[in-house]
């Protein structure tokens, strides 16, 4: 895995980018479920991951069901890992890629700061990938 550091200069930084940790170029697949619903909303490819979140590229039709701020469960399987991560996060933003695909920014809840009714999760293990 290679890492790329986010520039800290204010004048050229994207104001939407609030990352505190390096990004990894790892990719994989993700399954997304809105908390409180029984069935997964859909799946897509994961790219541009960091300790605090990930980007999920998905079908534009089902991405339209997801609102910013909604809490989601994500099963993330990175290409170089054998076991998936069970993550809990919040949809931070959504934007279309083209007419068939959208991109979701998922901000992971900090380890130990999940709601009482959140399922057990691997957010702490995910974050450890970036601190090693």
Image: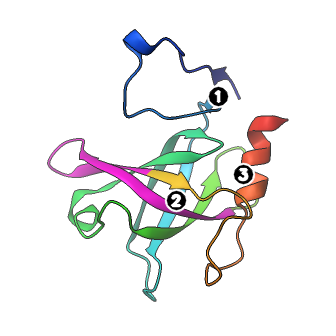
Q: Measured along the vertical axis of the image, is residue 15 above or below residue 29?
A: above
Q: Position of residue 31 (x, y in %)?
A: 50, 66
Q: Measured along the vertical axis of the image, is residue 68 above or below residue 12?
A: below
Question: Residue 124 sits in which quadrant?
Answer: bottom right
| The one of 117 and 127 positioned closer to us in this rendering | 117
C-alpha separation, residue under disc 2 versus residue under disc 1: 20 Å
Locate the C terminus and report the quarter of the image it occupies.
top right
Please tell me which residue is depicted at 37% across the width and 34% down the height of the picture.
Answer: 16
| The one of 77 and 130 positioned closer to us in this rendering | 130
SS category of the residue bearing label 2: strand
Please tell me which residue is depicted at 74% across the width and 64% down the height of the picture.
Answer: 112
The residue identified by callout 1 is 22
- Left-right relation of 26 to 42: right
Q: Which residues are magenta?
A: 85-105
The residue identified by callout 2 is 30
Q: Is residue 102 magenta?
A: yes
Q: Is residue 62 magenta?
A: no
Q: Earlier in the sequence, mark 2 or mark 3?
A: 2
The residue identified by callout 3 is 126
Q: Earlier in the sequence, mark 3 or mark 1?
A: 1
SS category of the residue bearing label 3: helix
Please tell me which residue is depicted at 61% across the width and 37% down the height of the picture.
Answer: 26
Q: How many callouts does the rendering have?
A: 3
**How many other residues sit within 10 Å of disc 3, few (<14), some (14-19) or many (≥20)?**
many
Q: What secondary structure is the magenta-colored segment mainly?
A: strand
Residue 4 visible? The answer is yes
- Left-right relation of 85 to 40: right
C-alpha separation, residue under disc 2 versus residue under disc 3: 14 Å
SS category of the residue bearing label 1: loop
Question: Residue 74 sits in which quadrant?
Answer: bottom right
| The one of 28 and 34 positioned closer to us in this rendering | 34
Q: Earlier in the sequence, mark 2 or mark 1?
A: 1
């Amino acid at each position: 895995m290679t890492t790329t550091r986010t520039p800290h200069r204010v004048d050229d930084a994207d104001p939407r980018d609030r990352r505190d940790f390096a990004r990894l170029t790892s990719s994989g697949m993700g399954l997304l479920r809105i908390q409180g619903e029984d069935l997964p909303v859909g799946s897509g490819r994961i790219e541009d991951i960091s300790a605090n979140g990930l980007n999920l590229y998905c079908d534009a039709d089902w991405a339209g069901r997801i609102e910013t701020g909604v809490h989601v469960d994500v099963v993330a399987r990175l290409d170089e890992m054998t076991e998936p991560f069970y993550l809990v996060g919040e949809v931070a933003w959504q934007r279309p890629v083209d007419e068939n695909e959208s991109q979701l920014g998922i901000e992971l809840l900090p380890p130990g700061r999940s709601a009482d009714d959140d399922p057990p999760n691997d957010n702490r293990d995910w974050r450890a990938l970036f601190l090693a």
